[in-house]
Image (tube, rainbow, N blue to C red):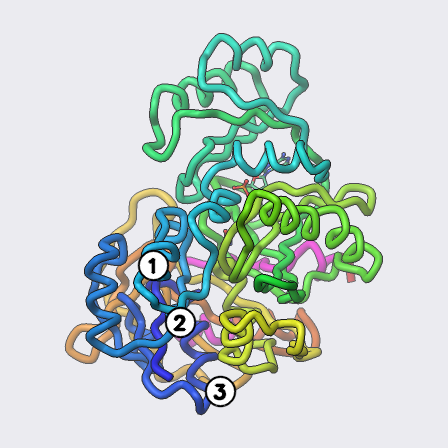
Amino acid sequence: MNLAVIGSGGREHALCYKLRQSKEVKKLYCIPGNAGTKKFADNINQDVSNFEEVYRVLKDKKIDLVIVGPEEPLVNGIVDFLTERKINVFGPNKFSSQLEGSKAFMKNLCKKYDIPTANFGIFDELNTAFNFLEKSELPIVVKADGLAAGKGVSICKSKEEAKTKIKEIIEGKFKSSKKVVLEEFIEGEELSYFCVVDKNTFRFFGSAQDHKRVGEGDTGPNTGGMGAYSPASLLTKKLEEKIIKKIIEPTLKALKEMGNSYKGFLYAGLMIKENEPYLIEYNIRMGDPECQVLMMRLKTSLFDVVKSVINNDLKNLSIEWSDENCMTIVLCSRGYPDKYEKNIEIKNLDKVINDEKNQIFHAGTIEKNKKIFSNGGRVLNVTSLGNNLINTRKKCLYNLNKIGWGDGFFRKDIGWRIIEKK
Ligand code: AMP
Ligand code: GLY
């Protein structure tokens, strides 16, 4: 079979790495890909927001199956577009993608189906939002309704700050929507819970914890993710039963009742408070960088997982995971998540061990004349498997120091909450 992965981040590099291990995958393409995906797939330099052109490329290369990595094309309906044209696609349709594309949609669904989530209000008008704010306790979480590339959520400690954020959203700071969601702040520990879903059933697809803040000790502004590890120590059998019964099953049932079945990866961002799960957000895709650690731990062929979803045969597949833990640390361009420079050469990559326990997944990189240059804020994901998280982190840091990219920075404390508990 010929496959294509859509996207250009570390997540897509990890998907290509894993897919390449299956003999059934004859040709593998990545659209547009990066300097790392090139090792496992043929990159096709095509703008993925132009669905007509993507379709033309898929036909041209005789691609049988497409896996969509990022949220934007999913929310914009790439699955519906390609399915209508008889292409097999792994990913949810436009309707189901509202789980991530519209926080208002997700919150209303939670309310209707009694799914535990933070108390909230949805507003498209300043006065009513401010009235709700007056009656709310602090801190309060202010969220843009639509996609905002990780920049749409603010945890506000004062009403003044909340008013500024509300105003920005209602006045159109984010092109995707002018609605604002005001939400109760839930104090707890975060857990990322992943499933893979077909028309009939779903399977657990790993757990992880990521670190979204730029600074050590989880301080400073939010980023796309500075590092992650898997499995998440927080997840017990009992907690998992609650997540499934109270959150995952009612969500999939709700979508079905609305005439839609879900297909693809589903990522529940949860807050765990007194052993109870609360849904903070849904993502309709794999996490980035969580995907990188999950692909290293996945023992089952990713191609078999994807094929089972396309054939609605997931119930007959058992998905196996390595007992080892995995960590990834993100090497970023200096200045990220604010201003940073691009096009800086990264040397020494060939000096780092590259085997089934250590991988460097590329994110914002580009290859020119056989040299690798930075091309984004998050540049490389230095990833290792190990049998104890402290040693796994040491391996990642050892590899990062070997690269020794002076124009970048990384957090040295990924996994600190659990490592310090030990
Ligand atoms: P989101 O983009 O919705 O995942 O929000 C980004 C981050 O903000 C989350 O990972 C949480 O750390 C935090 N957050 C969002 N909503 C809440 C909430 N209701 N209570 C506490 N923290 C939250
Ligand atoms: N690492 C967070 C995300 O992928 O949304």
Q: Amino acid at mark 2?
A: His
The span from disc 2 to disc 1 (Cα, nearest Å) is 28 Å
Q: What residue is at 69 percent from the left and 38 percent from the top? A: 113
Residue 102, horizontal then vertical, whole percent: 48, 37
Disc on res. 355? 3
Asked if one can make out residue 177 in the rendered structure from this viewpoint, the answer is yes
Disc on res. 13? 2
Mark 1 highlights which residue?
Answer: 84
Q: Amino acid at mark 1?
A: Glu
- Give the vertical position of 375 relative to 278 (above or below): below
Query: Mark 3 or mark 2, which is nearer to you?
Result: 2
Element type at mark 1: helix
316 relative position to 105: left or right: right
Disc on res. 95? none
Q: For mark 3, does the 10 Å Cα neighbourhood hold few (<14), some (14 to 19), or many (20 or more) residues?
A: few
Residue 378, horizontal then vertical, whole percent: 38, 57
Asked whether disc 2 touches disc 1, contact meaning CB atoms under 8 Å apart, the reply is no
Asked if one can make out residue 321 in the rendered structure from this viewpoint, the answer is no
The stretch of residues the image draws in magenta is 397-420
Residue 320, horizontal then vertical, whole percent: 66, 79
Question: Observer-nearest residue: 204 or 341?
Answer: 204
Tell me which label, 3 or 1, sits earlier in the chain: 1
Question: Observer-nearest residue: 372 or 126?
Answer: 126
8 relative position to 278: left or right: left
- Give the vertical position of 386 relative to 228 (above or below): below
Q: Amino acid at mark 3?
A: Asp
The span from disc 3 to disc 1 (Cα, nearest Å) is 40 Å
